[in-house]
Image: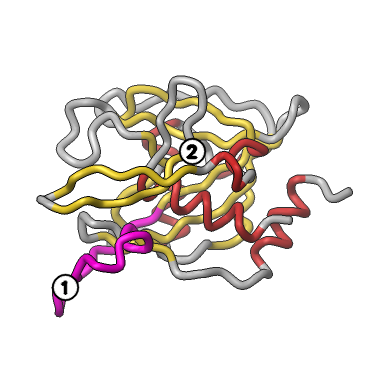
Amino acid sequence: MQNDEDRLRAALTRPARPSSDFDLNPAIALPPGRVLRPAAVLVPVWLRPDGARLILTKRASHLKHHPGQIAFPGGKVDAGDDGPVGAALREAWEEIGLSADLVTVLGTLPTHETVTGFTVTPVLALVRGDFTPVPEAGEVEEAFTVPLSHVLDPARYHIERRRWRGEWRRYYTVPYGPYYIWGATARILRGLADRVV
């Protein structure tokens, strides 16, 4: 039986479908000539003696974009970053105190277009060793972990809907305990789950 690291590495070799906030909403017309801003997130899988866990954050409730939502550590790609991977590692350090020394990057997942005008590159990575998250008070309300097995099980995902800008919008959810994981975060994880066997 493959361990979690081998399963994730193998998943990256399998075909992937495109990913966006519009996957479940084909009737929504995207504006022609739209300009998307590059962003990156780290999808950090922490290899622990008690089993692999995914590290996620709960965004601070006062933020302008996505307040209180569950998210990966990440943000805009800055000019000084070494591309999306560099941005994801920088943001993980800034948001939760995750040192790049503890991180092994496995590769990237398909870019994800958001309704807020970003094209997000998810960077799949392993975290090894002792790590105590230190949430950045200005951006992150909480850092927490979810069993990797939970988010890699397609049966855990549901499709829900809500009204957004006057239209019904459908989206994936993969709740865990008190955490409502939905939207882009859930869609990126569902895409990964579809590639893991």
Say what amino acid the circle numbered 2 marks: Val
Residue 84 in the image: state x and y as whole percent.
42, 61
Q: What is the number of the mark on residue 174?
A: 2
Q: Is residue 46 magenta?
A: no
Q: Residues within 10 Å of mark 2 (few under 14, many from 20)?
A: many
Quadrant for residue 54, please give it. Answer: top right
Q: Amino acid at mark 1?
A: Arg
- Looking at the image, residue 179 sits to the left or right of residue 62; the answer is right
- Residue 39, by quadrant, is bottom left
* Of the pair 124 and 176, the residue shown nearer to us: 176
Residue 45 position, x and y percent, is: 61, 41
Q: Is residue 76 above or below residue 50?
A: below
Q: Residue furthest left?
A: 166
Residue 10 or 197: which is nearer the viewer? 197
Q: Position of residue 55 (x, y in %)?
A: 53, 34
Q: How many numbered circles are shown?
A: 2
1 and 2 marks in contact (CB < 8 Å): no
Q: Which mark is residue 34?
A: 1
Residue closest to the eye, 151 or 100 = 151
Residue stretch rendered in magenta on the structure:
21-40
